Image: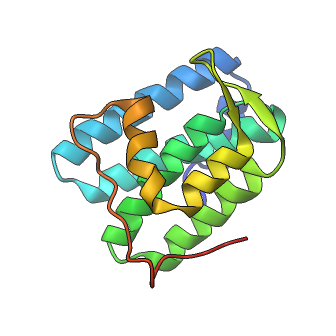
Amino acid sequence: MKFLCPHHRSMFANLSLIEQNDLWVYWMENALTLYESRDSEKVIIVAGNAFDLACLVRTRNSDCMHVELTLSAILLCSILRNCGEHSVADDMLLRALESLRATERCHVRMSEYCSSNECIDILLDASLQPDFFAQYLNWPTCPVTYPSKQSAMMVH
């Protein structure tokens, strides 16, 4: 499932990396507002746009946006699972993992280095996600809920 239409994908692909990152931040800020309003459908759309944008950026700049991709994947997968869309959430998780496996390291905007392997570990281990989410987004509440260990998807 893709959230951005081909026209918008093309348009956003031509933005500078700074503009793409700013757009990602804008969508995630909107996702917070919608989450606080308890509008799950719109959170899925906006978080999906942020997720697609991060995936799109990584197809051309595979050494960028590890953290952004991971954050938007965490949010998107959590909201999809809460809405009963487990197979769609699993598909989004697989897309994120495929993108993250494309490179070894990236330079993130926060002037820190983040290993793609660390991001993969975070996506695969739900117990690591609240701290990661809080570290980078610092939302008043963490919207991420976690499946039990028995029902968690394990992808290697």
Which residue is farthest left? 37
| Colouring rule applied to residues | rainbow
Residue 62 visible (yes or no): no
Residue 2 visible (yes or no): yes
- Asked if residue 122 is positioned above or below residue 31 in the image, the reply reads below
Q: Is residue 98 left or right of residue 35?
A: right
Q: What residue is rendered at 61% in x and 18% in y?
A: 109
- Residue 152, percent from left and from top: 49, 76
Q: Is residue 142 left or right of residue 25?
A: left
Q: Is residue 130 left or right of residue 122?
A: left
Quarter where residue 105 is shown: top right
98 or 110, which is in the foreground?
110
- Asked if residue 87 is positioned above or below residue 145 in the image, the reply reads below
User: What is the number of callouts on the image?
Assistant: 0
15 or 83, which is in the foreground?
83
Q: What residue is rendered at 45% in x and 30% in y?
A: 136
Q: Is residue 1 left or right of residue 84?
A: right
- Asked if residue 29 is positioned above or below residue 72 in the image, the reply reads above
- Asked if residue 60 is positioned above or below residue 77 in the image, the reply reads above
62 or 154, which is in the foreground?
154
- Residue 25, percent from left and from top: 46, 27
Q: What residue is rendered at 63% in x and 46% in y?
A: 119
**Quadrant that contains the N terminus:** bottom right
- Residue 94, percent from left and from top: 66, 65
**Quadrant that contains the C terminus:** bottom right
Quarter where residue 91 is shown: bottom right
141 or 96, which is in the foreground?
141
Q: What residue is rendered at 42% in x and 32% in y?
A: 135
